[in-house]
Amino acid sequence: MIKNRVDNVDVRNTFEFEKSVIKRRVLFVEQNTEATQKLLEILAEMPRYPVTTTVAPVDVIEQIQINQFDVVIIDNSTPQPPQWDVLHKLCDILRELPIIVLSGDESQGIKALRIGAKDYLIESEVNPRSLARTIRYTLEHSSVLRDLKRAKLQEESAKAQSAHLLDLSSQLKAPIHVLLGFTEVMHEGQLGSVGCAKYEDHIADTHKCATHLSSLLDNLLQASDAQTAQ
């Protein structure tokens, strides 16, 4: 069963602050009812950091529209020992979302990071301020990583495009140079007179088109090099 809980907008702030507030959508993966209630009470007390929380058990996660959430909190502190297979599964399903793990101790938290979580909190030490800070840090860190990944993909795409253009240019340059050389030989009559004025015009047009194509390729390569350098 999926339950929507906690809507903790801090009404004590000014109207200017309210306009700039972005309410974060938190998915809490429930494994223990008592721990869930405790966390919801903490979320409700978080200062100046409004959230809307949806609580769902592990077995319905695959049915949830994941893109509706900003961050996921998973209680992995109970039952003991921690259910690492569950965490592995959730990290695989929720790979696009930053995951925070509630752990029983620091060693469990570090193991959660190695599995795929973005951050962890020790359950006995959680308070409204530390939870708000962890959510903020996790979201900002994930945003930076997404930006870096996007920039890397753009860079790789630009390099691939440049390599493709270079390969295409090398393939086109050879026949273009043949056309240029052949038309120059015919135009100069190095192997004998063409003997027809109309043919002379066709030769001149062919030479002009080949020169234009060669110039276009050079300009295209220069533009590609300049874009890659940026």
Image (cartoon, rainbow, N blue to C red):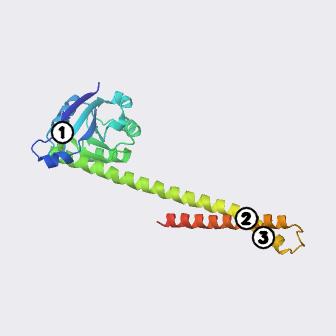
Q: Which mark is residue 43?
A: 1
Task: Determine the CA span between mark 1 and mark 2.
Answer: 70 Å
Among numbered discs 3 and 1, the one appearing first in the sequence: 1
| Label 3 Cα neighbours within 10 Å, binned few <14 / some 14-19 / many ≥20 | some
Q: Is residue 111 left or right of residue 168?
A: left
| Label 1 Cα neighbours within 10 Å, binned few <14 / some 14-19 / many ≥20 | many
Q: Is residue 2 left or right of residue 147?
A: left
Q: Which mark is residue 176?
A: 2
Q: Residue at x 18, y 47 (%)?
A: 130
Q: Quadrant of residue 95?
A: top left
Q: Residue at x 21, y 31 (%)?
A: 5
The x and y percentages for residue 173 are 70, 65
Q: Which residue is most to the front?
A: 197
Among numbered discs 3 and 2, the one appearing first in the sequence: 2
Q: Which amino acid is tagged 1? A: Leu
Front position in the image: 196 or 66: 196
Task: Determine the CA span between mark 3 and mark 1.
Answer: 78 Å
Mark 2, secondary structure of its residue:
helix
- Of circles 3 and 1, the one toward us is 3
The x and y percentages for residue 8 are 16, 38
The x and y percentages for residue 115 are 38, 44
Mark 3, secondary structure of its residue:
helix
Front position in the image: 164 or 146: 164
> For mark 3, what is the residue?
181
Mark 1, secondary structure of its residue:
helix
